Image: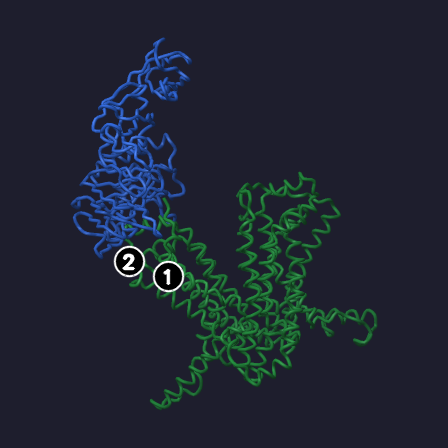
Chain colours: A green, B blue
Amino acid sequence: MTIPQFLAKPFWPRSFDGILSVWPWLALTTGLGIAMPVLFVAGNLFVPSTELWTHLAETVLAGYVVNSLWLMLGVSFGVTIGGVGTAWLVTMCRFPGSRLLEWAQLLPLAMPAYVVAYAYTWLLDYAGPLQSLIRTLFGWTSARDYWFFEIRSLGGAILVMSLVLYPYVYLLARSAFLEQSVCVLEASRTLGQSPWRAFWRVALPLARPSIAAGVALALMETLNDFGTVHYFAVDTFTTGIYRTWLGMGQPAAAGQLGAVLMLFILGLLLLERFSRGAARHHHTTGRYRNLPKVRLTPFPAFLALAFCGLAVLLGFLIPAGLLCVMAIGSYNTEISSEFIYFARNSLILALITGLLAVLLALILGYAQRLHPTKLIRTCLRLSALGYAIPGSVIAIGILVPLISLDKAISTALAQFFGIDLGGLVLTGSIGALIYAYCVRFLAISVQTVEASLSKVTPSLEAAARTLGLNAFKRLTKVHMPVIRGSLLTAGLLVFVDVMKELPATLIMRPFNFDTLATKVFMLASDERLAEAAFPALAIVAVGLLPVVLLSSAIAHSRPGEDS
Amino acid sequence: MSVKEGLLLENVVLGFGGRRVVDDVSLTVEPGELVCLLGPSGCGKTSTLRLAAGLEKPDKGLIFLNGRLVSGDGTHLPPESRHVGFLFQDYALFPHLNVLGNVAFGLDDLPARDRSRQALDKLEQVGMLSYADAWPHQLSGGQQQRVALARALAPNPSLMLLDEPFSGLDKRLRDLVRDETLHVLKSSRVSTLMVTHDPEEAMFMADRIAVMKEGRIVQCDTPVNLYSRPADPFVASFFGEVNSVEAKVRAGRIETCLGSFDARNFIDGAKVELLIRPEAVNVLPDPDGKAVVLASRLLGRTSLIHLKVENPGGTPVHLHARLASRLLPPENSRASLELDSSQIFLFPISSDA
């Protein structure tokens, strides 16, 4: 007989060793520590508005809102078309290259949006190779002689972000299509629907919650983006926060901008939560069989190949190729020696954060395991808050309180001990930056670890107890060895995200401390695009690691599929 | 070897969200004795086992292990300090350790050499020595069960707790493994508390059986006594199919269409239920008999006869008889019945039943 856990879920651990056990306390500390910056920024919603805020609201806020909304609208349109279209084609149809394209759709995930933006700008700019070629071919001499698509615009930002973010929708839509029982589709076929009509009337409505969740994820990434919109001079919240903070030196106003941005995110989170909740009711039969793929005739097959191929081409292959061309053209020894320095900084940050994130996730997951109470579940949810919050907002949530703390410390030290620290100690430290990364990315490792801990069945745990192991030994001798693969995955995912992270690093990095990402950003801002290509390629190469992981997971993900 | 003094539960109560899963249970397992907790699913038997292991903490009551208070009265010794062996329904072998690693898992306190020797000894005892280097996923269900048994026995626990240890095995393998497990436990002379929902299994394994229903122990006795002197209709019907006939006591006798019986302790006017085991009914061909054969079925070792018995002044009684004979009375023939009164049980009909 299984014990109904939901019947026994008190707030604080009721069990004998609950109060004495160290785990609930560790979980509580972690949860609160991770949630604090987010809650701090949210608190700005209730702060009375300053004069500057009124000024901002009157002048630029409307522009930020309008631009952000257009960006979100455009990106949702782009990622839906790209993600759903490719997912449907590769799961339901057979055409030349469909197997390869099934996992190749993930490649754009390796590309940070800002890197793609730089690559396309280099190609499509007035001075770029394409326009130069056209001018030479037709004998035009200036921009007034012809019309050409301006990549550095809102439209360009929408295009670039759609190209790198559509895999989110692809992943969720694809698994939704795969999870749909073939019976449902076949039933609709026997009721006289053509495959195309069956898609519109059955498959798409069934997958809609997953698609909405995928779009919500893509939009969170859109709102988080700083590099692209900054480079394209599209004023959104993230650029606004950056300018208000670093340009005007107004942390409070930046915090208030961040709070407004969080309202947007809240809307997206609700959308995502709502759509996932709805998804639960949709399985009426548990029978699965291999999907009978429709073999396409030559012309439709060509169209399918073109659509799926183009998505990968534009989202990954062309930008990656451009980066290679740029890197080769601009290579010199100075770059390579500098590169090692930045790469080392990035690696150290990513490595420490990856380890820390796994450790904290283990603490939270194991504490929940030992004491499944409301409090600890809340801690887990709190620790995941940061994933939805843009890096720039998290940076503010950490820096503002930290600066006050720093000032208080240095005043106190000067006053009581006569020690002059000569500046702020905590604020520009690597520790603060790693803290910010943990806030932003802990959700990834928590999710991975939590899911894998379910592999350790309650009776495995009980067996270890009856064989004489205490809580800590059970963790190290049973849980950790059993889930070691997932621990590695969790660490790797965080590692890669830290390598790519730009806005928080830019705001919080120590003085004169650059990572690959910030260096790419600085070089691009100085219009030294070609020189940025080499470090950008390194980021892309690291970003390919989780793509490989995901694609192998995808190969084994079909329920009922012979493996 | 450690001194084995068994397990004692006194008025133990365990509730989940207001529902008493274990309700005032008292139970002893004497040194070296094998006691089965028997009952339908959800009756609280597994919870009782988990209480003994320390995996659950009782709301009320006391639990003693080898004469030492381990639960209750403000004390709760966690499972890792109780020194009990637990055999799980799903065996719970550690997937990251091989067979030897699993069996040696609980022997942390020993030096490395003694540890592997003791583990190998236990593997030999369960006949799995040649699989020491194998991984759990390479083993069949029966082999996993044996490894799990060796793992639980390896630290020489004073008490073994078995949770439906054979339910994962198919019928033929189950009989074999059951037999081996019984011999291993008996040769280890370890006190054992085992949970099962299968009465035949309980009777096969147990010195004594505690029958549980809705969190309470209904009767705790030897298999023979449970079968021949069940304490209530639930116990009687749990150990085998029974025919049920209702009647009223008149002048110290119980008159039914099946015959007249002594009312034993029941007073006149009391409503009683007669439970008759099918084995207690003998069917004799008799053209003038009161019973009609509805169907005769050979079931293998025994045959089952469906009978309709005329009941003057009432509806006819449907009766099952189980015969060892393979010579079956033809359908629609008449027969007279002979009842073995030692297998007829009398129970009062309670007003709420």
Q: Amino acid at mark 2?
A: Phe
* Mark in front: 1 vs 2: 1
Q: Taking B225 as reference, is A274 left or right?
A: right
Is residue A98 at all visible to an observer of this figure?
yes
Q: Do callouts 1 and 2 point to residues on the same chain? A: yes
Residue in front for this viewpoint, B262 or A78: B262
Residue B129 appears at what percent x and percent y?
Answer: 30, 39
The residue under label 1 is A11
Count the marks.
2
Residue in front for this viewpoint, B50 or A443: B50
Q: Callout 1: helix, strand or loop?
A: loop
Is residue B201 at all visible to an observer of this figure?
no
Q: Residue at x 63, y 60 (%)?
A: A166
Residue B149 appears at what percent x and percent y?
Answer: 30, 41
A482 relative to B224, above or below: below
Residue in front for this viewpoint, A278 or A297: A278
A289 relative to A111, above or below: above
Query: Which residue, as the protein is rendered here, is positioned at the far top?
Result: B287
Q: Amino acid at mark 1?
A: Phe
Please report, as a chain letter, where disc 2 is located: A
Q: Quadrant of residue B252?
A: top left
Q: Callout 2: helix, strand or loop?
A: loop
Q: Residue at x 70, y 55 (%)?
A: A307
The residue under label 2 is A16
A142 relative to B105, above or below: below
Dot 1 or dot 2: first in sequence order is 1
Residue A176 appears at what percent x and percent y?
Answer: 58, 51
Quadrant where the image shows the N terminus of chain A = top left
The answer to whether the residue labelled 1 contacts the one labelled 2, judged by CB atoms less than 8 Å apart, is no
Q: Which mark is residue A535?
A: none
Q: Residues within 10 Å of mark 2 (few under 14, many from 20)?
A: some
